[in-house]
Amino acid sequence: MNKKIVSIFMTATIVAGTLAGCGGASDSQNTADASGEEGKIINIYSWNDEFRQRVEAVYPEVKETSKDGTVTTLNDGTEIHWVVNPNQDGVYQQKLDEALLKQADAAADEKIDIFLSETDYVNKYTDADAGAAMALKDIGIDPDKDLADQYDFTKVTASDADGVQRGSTWQCCPGLLVYRRDIAKEVFGTDDPGAIGEKTKDWDAMKATANELSAKGYYALSSYADTFRLYGNSIEEPWVKNGETTIRVDQKIMDWVNNSKEWLDAGYFNKTVKGQFNDDWNKAMGSESKVFAFLLPAWGTDFVLNPNWDGEAGAWAVTTLPQEYNWGGSYVHAATGTDNVEHVKDIILAVTADKDNLLKISKDYSDFTNTKKGMQEAAKDDSFASDFLGGQNPFEYYAPVAENIKIAPLSAYDQGCVELIQNAFSDYFQGKVDFEKAKANFETAVKERYPDITEIHWPE
């Protein structure tokens, strides 16, 4: 494991020490180590019970799960032990990193067999030098054949710099504009998704629509944080190029800063909402809110908007958004050193590659799943209609967005850069600091998180 990877891989709370065995062996050697008799315990690291629910729903070898959700027993007697740590404050990654650093010397029943990562930091684990995630081909999965129906950008996201796929996902997370039908009728005279889509189809149309909404006392969107990923997911070069120690702030990020300031000053955002996943943002989703719309993927509508809505079902609808983008995705990895290669292979294939299973997940959990043919079918199938969306079938709108998503170039520094630049410029938007101070604060914060970074390059 090289020095740069170590600095990313280890959190501040882990004392630097010997890393012998963590990443030195080749994939073929690691496969040989793990290709003997299968173990009796499969350890799966994740941050919630979402993946467990999907496994229970579609993996045919599941027999039962303990009442506390910590152990799932398979038909052959093998036990899946679910090791769950919260994502908040980096706890999940810290615990996972600590375990991965001990993986080579861990007893068989204590080795990680499967672990999950999110799009924001997947690159950290799929980097070949990290030695954390096995190449799928080395556990018997042929990405070109077995995963041919997956959306291409999800396969790229889960691959290393050489294009070797080291993870797979059941999710594809295209975003849509989710809007209040009652506000649409009041301001525009219609809540028809096609008609509203014409008013939100690009940034020029969206700006004109925001002005109409503002004139009637409504906000187009809740916060500048809502639009960040549309810009951030379209960057043209990675935050940090491979082998470099310079952070390059893409022009698209500065476009977000400039446009957000303009929209905030114009009253198109609610100034009291200062981010996402906080109390102000949650309240902006309630029936007393003056916010017209949110930019959300399927999981956002189902797991965030729906629980925060305190009105009747059918009050929301989805339509075209100004710019195609993807938000999120949970990637499943075979951990280097696993002693359960066959079980790991079967679980990954069952949950991320079987079209019928993926359609079941979409039906049961409202996930937009990672099967191009399946989602094309769902888009035309009224049984996928949503009561929350007033009987609308959202897959009709999600499917074409997913087909056209191009993943932004990834780096192992993405999560920190994305978080810290939003924090720094939030202070600017709120009038706490000026523009140059916001830039300086970002530079300070990002160097504190990543001590190996030597320079921050801003666009001209």
Image (cartoon, rainbow, N blue to C red):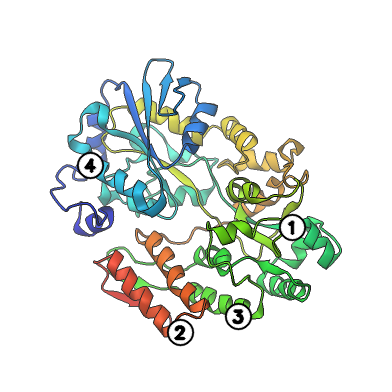
Q: Which residue is mark 1?
A: 180
Q: Are marks 4 and 2 in contact (CB under 8 Å)?
A: no
The crowd level at tag 1 (other Cα within 10 Å; few <14, some 14-19, many 20+) is many
> Quick check: can you spot residue 69?
yes
Q: Which residue is mark 3?
A: 262
Sequence order check, earlier mark of 4 and 2: 4
Q: Which residue is mark 4?
A: 26
Under circle 1, the secondary element is strand
The crowd level at tag 4 (other Cα within 10 Å; few <14, some 14-19, many 20+) is some
Mark 4–mark 2 distance (CA, rounded to whole Å) = 50 Å
Q: Which residue sits at x=73%, y=49%?
A: 311
Q: Position of residue 61 (x, y in %)?
A: 47, 20
Under circle 2, the secondary element is loop
Mark 3–mark 1 distance (CA, rounded to whole Å) = 24 Å
Mark 4–mark 1 distance (CA, rounded to whole Å) = 53 Å
Sequence order check, earlier mark of 4 and 1: 4
Q: Are marks 1 and 2 in contact (CB under 8 Å)?
A: no
Q: Which residue sits at x=70%, y=47%?
A: 394
Mark whose residue sits in front, 4 or 2:
2
- 226 left or right of 407? right
Say which amino acid is labelled 1.
Arg
Say which amino acid is labelled 4.
Ser
The crowd level at tag 2 (other Cα within 10 Å; few <14, some 14-19, many 20+) is few
Instruction: Tell which of 363 and 183 is nearer to you.
Output: 183
Say which amino acid is labelled 2.
Asp
**Quadrant of the rendered image containing residue 438:** bottom left
